[in-house]
Image: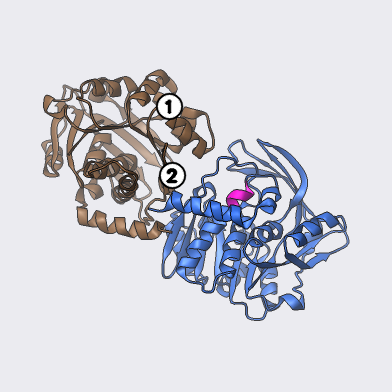
Chain colours: A blue, B brown
Amino acid sequence: MTLLVVGSTAFDTVETPHGTAKDCLGGSSTYFALAARLFTKVRLVSVVGQDFPAEHRQLLTQHGIDIAGLEEKPGKTFRWHGRYSADMNSRITIDVQLNTFGSFQPKVPNSFQDSPFVFLANGAPATQLSVLQQMHAPKFIVADTMDLWIERERDGLLELLRKVHGVILNDAEAKQLTGESNLIKAGKKVLALGPSLVILKKGEHGCFLFSNYFHYAIPAYPTESVVDPTGAGDSFAGGFMGYLDGCDHLNFSNMKRALAYGTVTASLNVEGFGVSRIAAADRATVDRRYHELLQFVAP
Amino acid sequence: MTLLVVGSTAFDTVETPHGTAKDCLGGSSTYFALAARLFTKVRLVSVVGQDFPAEHRQLLTQHGIDIAGLEEKPGKTFRWHGRYSADMNSRITIDVQLNTFGSFQPKVPNSFQDSPFVFLANGAPATQLSVLQQMHAPKFIVADTMDLWIERERDGLLELLRKVHGVILNDAEAKQLTGESNLIKAGKKVLALGPSLVILKKGEHGCFLFSNYFHYAIPAYPTESVVDPTGAGDSFAGGFMGYLDGCDHLNFSNMKRALAYGTVTASLNVEGFGVSRIAAADRATVDRRYHELLQFVAP
């Protein structure tokens, strides 16, 4: 099958206790796609400026990612500069330049509109909804969001939640969206808003999956080497959606496996600056780590 | 087999968003014993003042706990008064009166000195070491500690760690003890200090187990009703040690099961003020929740 991702492409400057990486390739669609391509065919819709170099396009296409939906517009590519705390559990944004991403109106190429799996990376709910209007009845749609949209575009977000199959939130976002401080209650309240699948990410503490039929929890892969947490959430989503897209059925067992694969791709991602580690990973590495993770969590 | 616990007995006044409970029975040995008695015979060594009522002794003995080591001394029982934050993830201490516990010199009754399993609840390392000197070669010793002793009695604590089989720490304590912000590295560093088993508690995020042979992670039981988190760590330790004490072998499978049982007794404990919920629990309730937990975490 094929998996469509719509999201940002960026140049990130990242400061962590391990050093600083300047203007490295980033953005939600990039992290997602480089994780998902380990499992399935990925189609990417995003926007860049005239400063986006050929070598980045090559990196994506060399990894089998179809970038027919990567639009180039006059101006510059989205830029983000952030600094992580000593324990890397929090970060501050030093600078954001939205540039071409500020007026991103995703255009899904005709050849992408039949994609059965769709991931709507973090973006304005209206933008995410506009993508769905361009699609031909996708089988499985998952959306990400952020605190900004929960606060400022609540109605649009609630409309989106009624139209997607799954949503991925972090713990703070789930609490903010539902007004519920208990995460289990928060997860169930998000379910009641429409999606049949709710994934709550807890960073180094792993994630929860809520559905109307079963709940599931998986700890993070026990990595000792966190170099740069940027993109962890998107590479998690990429591993999850990518694995599922390669499955015959969307059943509970496959969803659990997909969560474990997402956990693995996120763990690889954070072990290098930017996309360096996830871009270098192959399926054998991922599978080895997947089996280690199962050993780590199997009761 | 039998399981000895040495720790505090207290009157706790607890304020949570769910209300206030005044002067309820608490203390590490009490929480531990009421969880462990669900699985095995428990012997308790602690100290109270002349204000400790007969009804509390009866509660303990009615649950099969041997309180021959519960010393009564002139003065009052240890009192603690705390207030939890709205999300119950942090608390402040409003008042502490150590009273008779301030000069606690545990005396292990002759009839208790052959106990094969020993839990040294949080206390000064010198006091914990004095308990070990009174024992006849116990088979399995686990100790708890806290930030105060890591800071002020580091040498004593390091000596203790060389003499116990296991140690239970929370995430902040493990980081403080090792100077390591990555929990996986911290766990391994604690192992290198002597214990062959290191359990790192992460509150609502579950716990890790580290040994030289395997690592394991288990999420917390997904409780929606946290009324009073006081004693969660001790009731966790009680379920863990209690279950293990009832096993024929200290192998990995049993340790994993014991961690799941500890997770369950902690989850019951936090659903009521003080010891009310864990004291009311029976083994059937615990086993039901244990199987629910396995379903929640099994990959």
In the picture shown, does residue B86 fall above or below B165?
below
**Quadrant in which residue B229 is drawn:** top left
Does residue B144 belong to the magenta stretch?
A: no
In the picture shown, does residue A168 fall above or below B34?
below
Describe the element under mark 1 as helix, strand or loop: loop
Residue farthest to the front? A284
Residue farthest to the bottom? A136
Q: Which residue is mark 1?
A: B193
In the picture shown, does residue B15 fall above or below B294?
above
Which is more N-terminal, label 2 or label 1? 2
Identity of the residue drawn at 29% across and 21% down: B129
Q: Amino acid at mark 1?
A: Leu
Magenta segment main secondary structure:
helix
Describe the element under mark 2 as helix, strand or loop: loop
Residue B50 visible? The answer is no
The residue nearer to you, when weighing B44 against B196, is B196
Mark 1 is surrounded, within 10 Å at the Cα level, by few (under 14), some (14 to 19) or many (20 or more) other residues, namely: some
The residue nearer to you, when weighing A225 against B37, is A225
Q: Quadrant of the N terminus of chain A?
A: bottom right
What are the residue bounds of the magenta stretch? A265-270
Query: Residue B112: where, in percent of width, then height?
Result: 15, 29
Q: Which mark is residue B89?
A: 2
Chain under disc 1: B
Q: Amino acid at mark 2?
A: Asn
